[in-house]
Amino acid sequence: MASIQRKIIHGHPYYYIVESRRVNGRPRPVVVQYLGTPDALLERLQNPQTQPLRARITQFAGVAALYDLARQLKLVELIDEHVPKRRQGPSVGQYILVAAINRCLAPTSKLRMPEWLAATPLPRWLGVHPKQFSSPRFWDNMDLLGEAEIDAIGQVLTPRLMDTFHLDPACLLFDCTNFDTFIDTETHSQLPQRGHAKSKRTDLRIVGLALLVTADFHVPLFWKVYPGNQHDSVTFSEVLKELTGRYRDLTRDCDDITLVFDKGNNSARNQNILDLTGFHFVGSLVPSQFADLLAIPMRKFHTLKEPPLESIQCFRLQRQLWGQARTLVITFSPELQRKQIRGIEQQLSKKRRLLDDLQVRLRRSQLPGAKGKGFSRESLIKQVEQICSGQHIRSLLQVDITEHNGLLKMTYRTDAAAYTRLQNNQLGKRILFTDHHDWTDPQIILAYRAQSHVEDAFADMKDPYFLSWEPMFHWTDSKIRVHAFYCVLALMMGCLLQRRAFQQGIKLSLHQLFKTLGGIQEVTNISSAAGKPGSAGRPRLQTTLSEMDSTQQALYRLFELDRYRKN
């Protein structure tokens, strides 16, 4: 039962609400709430609806969930163990953790990092001040984290991830992508190079990133940053050599591991390395390089009955590839064929418009009194080749350039026969190959389809609002590697949160998950000491959370975030 008690401190009376509770088996008075001096208590009773002077709103749930996950992994301690520094200011691990959480929730530049950090509970939990995370201090600490240290951290982090969260490494997915940079051409960096940009921005230098992720919510277990002009097959070769050294860690709780990769990683050298690693694999071949397989009549294909492959037809055979016997499965998907035809039609329409425009410009350039340099046969051929570039387009558009009385003429047509052959023989088909000779057709096909998970990981890293690789305001190779490191950490932590939510029936994309958690904010109402403006003394603070919907309440309970409101 509660009661009001009076205490005299330094000759002044103060009042408290006290309850009698048992402490170590004995009844003891426990202060429940401080009421203050008689004057303050009277003021509070006379003005019960005191309005706060102002409110402070900070991010809470997303930051707390990610911070808690990092604590489970002992991420800060792991980084600090490999990159020790003088006990001065935040540790390197704390800098990287702050950068990773920022990437997850509100990707920003290092210049704006203190501002973002001040609007989160992280300074309170880490025991740091936001001003300590200024861009110069951030860059100084990034310089301490070299390529060797990042690799060493990754080697320890991968088995820790698998042990802590019981990840299944039976099927691992590999793929590469690249990211645009705005680094000047004259900057002496080796990683940013001009290459085959996924964004089609041929004017920008790009940086490549290779990921090896689980089929279970694409959690990254291995990553590699490489020059933007390096071919994927070369990167895959380097990755395979490094994975060989980690094979024992990956197979501790798994009899064997199957790597899944796409046709861009094929080469005789890579196949030889794969045969020596102990990994099984499922890959795909470039269809146009195996015309005899594409010519196999559809009457020899059989239709699968297992969901979700009911519309798929396939044909199975064995063949020698790069000196080894492989099981091949040729698949045909009507849905894939329709999508490919739609894409080709769109490309053909675009190319025809460009050729029409080129015809008009050619005719105008040859009119009497026309201004400008005009066209030579060589320049016209060059422009035609540029327009007709692209998969399948060159074989479908037939362009003829003739010359009569010194005047050039260009005509074009769509090769209907070639288009029909393309539709009948190639479109909708994939050629898969594997060393799993005992696997069924559905097992091989579903394993290869899991490749979409690593594509989802890259799509998440290119989300402009959450988990984004950009902005990247770094131009030295060492800092670019560190940037990639905390971007991958951000993806890793986000995927683990999404996986845990999904296991409890909360099915959200990463974008939806972070948006939902971001809506749970900490609101601190700040009132004057005596309950009215202008009163002397320390302001009174009252902290609560913003209103939550049912999904937010479920996530709040799932991640046990109430623990962090008490810190």
Image: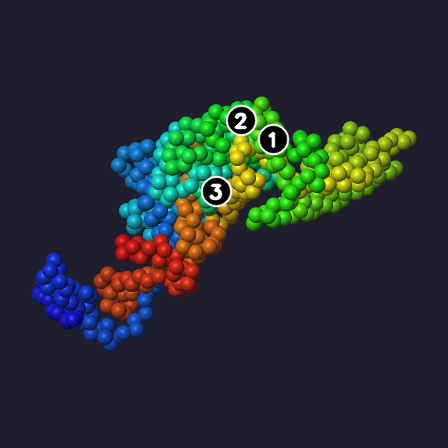
Give percent across and percent down for residue 244.
Answer: 44, 28
Q: Residue at x 38, y 37 (%)?
A: 253
Which of the two marks, 3 or 1, is nearer to us in this view?
Answer: 1
- Comparing 286 with 148, the one in front is 286
Categorize mark 2 by other alpha carbons within 10 Å: few (<14), some (14-19), many (20+): some
Q: Secondary structure at mark 2?
A: helix
Res. 362 image quadrant = top right
Give percent across and percent down for residue 346.
Answer: 71, 46
The residue carrying mark 1 is: 318
**Mark 1 and mark 3 in contact (Cβ < 8 Å)?**
no
Q: Amino acid at mark 3?
A: Ala
Does 482 appear above or below 323? below
Q: Secondary structure at mark 1?
A: strand
Residue 61 visible from this viewpoint: yes
Q: Amino acid at mark 1?
A: Gln
Give percent across and percent down for residue 82.
Answer: 32, 32
Q: Residue at x 51, y 41 (%)?
A: 454
Q: Residue at x 46, y 46 (%)?
A: 217
Which of the two marks, 1 or 2, is nearer to us in this view?
Answer: 1
Q: Amino acid at mark 2?
A: Asn
The residue carrying mark 3 is: 215
- Alpha carbon separation for disc pair 3 and 2: 22 Å
The residue carrying mark 2 is: 270
Q: Residue at x 29, y 50 (%)?
A: 124
